[in-house]
Amino acid sequence: MTERRAILSGSTFEEEIGYARAVVDGDRVHVSGTTGFDYATMTISDDVVEQAEQCLRNIGSALAEAGCSFADVVRVRYLLPDREDFEPCWPVLRRHFGEVRPAATMLVCGLSDPRMRIEIEVDARRPRTRDAASPA
């Protein structure tokens, strides 16, 4: 039977809307669209680069709880209301994904709160353990 488990971050949005920060489904990890809110304080910076940094901290926590890291990310989606905000975030994004080179898409779209300037969603594959990778 394939393992399926939800990972919660403590964001009030998860409870209010009814979703999980991430879902582990076997060796796959699906991280929901994640914004720049600091979930401990439910505050968000006005600066898009700081929001991108916080998005990635939030995503990194979910990946770690799922048993993987940014090195395991295979797909990333960037959602921004303003296309001009994307390029200032590139150094932050490159720091996390530059060596990994996941498939990526950037979309310009509205987000659910006007304070949100970037949302990031990732899919990853959990690494196999040596025992699991060995033939039986």
Image (cartoon, rainbow, N blue to C red):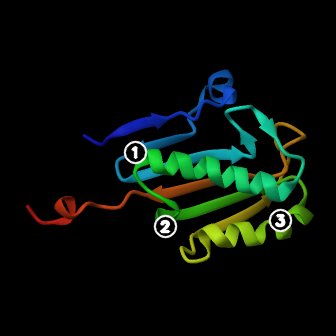
Reading the image, the residue beneath label 3 is 86
Residue 3 occupies which quadrant of the picture?
A: top left
Mark 1 is on which residue type?
A: Asp
Of the numbered discs 3 and 2, the one sitting upstream in the chain is 2
Residue under label 2? 71
Residue 4 quadrant: top left
Q: Is residue 62 above or below residue 103?
A: above
Crowd tier of the residue under label 2, counting other residues whose Cα lies within 10 Å: few below 14, some 14–19, many 20 or above: some
Mark 1 and mark 3 in contact? Answer it, CB < 8 Å. Answer: no
Q: Nearer the viewer, mark 3 or mark 2?
A: 2
Give how far apart the Cα atoms at labels 2 and 1 are: 18 Å
Looking at the image, which residue is at 24% across and 40% down?
A: 1
| Camera-side mark, 2 or 1 | 2
Q: Residue type at mark 2?
A: Ala
Q: Which mark is residue 25?
A: 1
Is 61 on the left or on the right of 43, as rendered?
A: left
In percent of width and height, residue 106 lies at 75, 63
The residue at the point 21 percent across, 64 percent down is: 130
Q: Is residue 85 above or below residue 81?
A: below
The one of 129 and 43 positioned closer to us in this rendering: 43
Quadrant that contains the C terminus: bottom left
For the residues marked 3 and 2, what is the alpha-carbon distance in whole angstroms?
A: 22 Å
The x and y percentages for residue 73 are 51, 63
Looking at the picture, tell me which residue is in the foreground, 45 or 15: 45
Q: Earlier in the sequence, mark 1 or mark 3?
A: 1
Dot 3: element: helix
